[in-house]
Amino acid sequence: MTTENLVSEIKKKKSFLCIGLDVDLEKIPKHLLKEEDPIFSFNKAIIDATHHLAVAYKPNTAFYEAYGLKGWQSLQKTIEYLNQNHPQIFTIADAKRGDIGNTSSRYAKAFFEDLNFDSITVAPYMGKDSVEPFLEFQDKHTILLALTSNQGAFDFQTEKIKSQELYKRVLHISKSWNNSENLMYVVGATKAEYLADIREIVPNSFLLVPGVGAQGGSLSEVCKYGMNDRVGLLINSSRGIIYASQGEDFAEAASAKAAELQQDMESILNAS
């Protein structure tokens, strides 16, 4: 999917909502455990109830890998369902990969060719040759971890190296890599006050912003400092939407929570 396709979907739906499909069998409604594939049954119901409100879905692969082969098959069925029924929706493999070049090229093939995701999250710690293999794929996007929403982000990401914070150094250097136009960046909603500085470095890039909702991030603050003339934001909410109810009405409850966020986004877009 091209960035233009994504922008078009945002304008059409008046939404920049990304829904995280982080499925925990201990949290999904109990009646689904009787299904042959409870993870896929849960995801399908969530997608069916929210696809008109969301422009992206983001399965965190750890929640699938934890269940072994069956979990991986559930992930594959989920992405196939999205690609077949909602090809206009942007898909993100939240896999946080990043290794030496030949290994990264295998990861890229796995997620971009075999599973056919539109994008993947990648850790930048090993540098240029661990990221560029992902950037070689046309109309695929690499979402680089820049400034994350967890408390441990302050351990390294905001530490100064030669008077510049590490996350800023990552942003600056990444712009020099081959096919850097295929880069997006992860910036946590709980770090909204940093977004103005980030926009000075990457004014045109899309930012994937987790942390709105259950982690306490503010949508209005993120938009105030992070929105650009193409919106340039994908606001992710996972637990706050998909676990809005653990009863048989879980899909309807998820839709209602997603609609609340979408309506807030529409108000922000109309005011901008």
Image (cartoon, grey):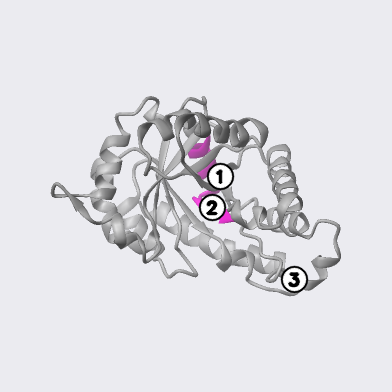
Report which residue position mark 2 lands on: 18
- The image quadrant of residue 126 is top left
Contact between marks 2 and 3 (CB within 8 A): the answer is no
Of 4 and 266, the residue lying toward us: 4
Q: Residue at x 57, y 56 (%)?
A: 20
Residue interval drawn in magenta: 4-20
The relative height of residue 167 versus residue 22 in the rendered view (above or below) is: above
Who is closer to the viewer here, 105 or 53?
A: 105
Contact check, label 2 and label 1, Cβ < 8 Å? yes
The dot on residue 92 is 1
Which element carries disc 1, helix, strand or loop?
strand
- Any magenta on residue 16? yes
Q: Percent position (x, y) of residue 22? A: 61, 59
Q: Earlier in the sequence, mark 1 or mark 3?
A: 3
Identify the residue at horizontal 29%, vertical 53% (top origin): 195
Q: CA distance from mark 1 to mark 3?
A: 25 Å
**Residue located beneath label 3 in the image:** 29
Q: Amino acid at mark 3?
A: Pro
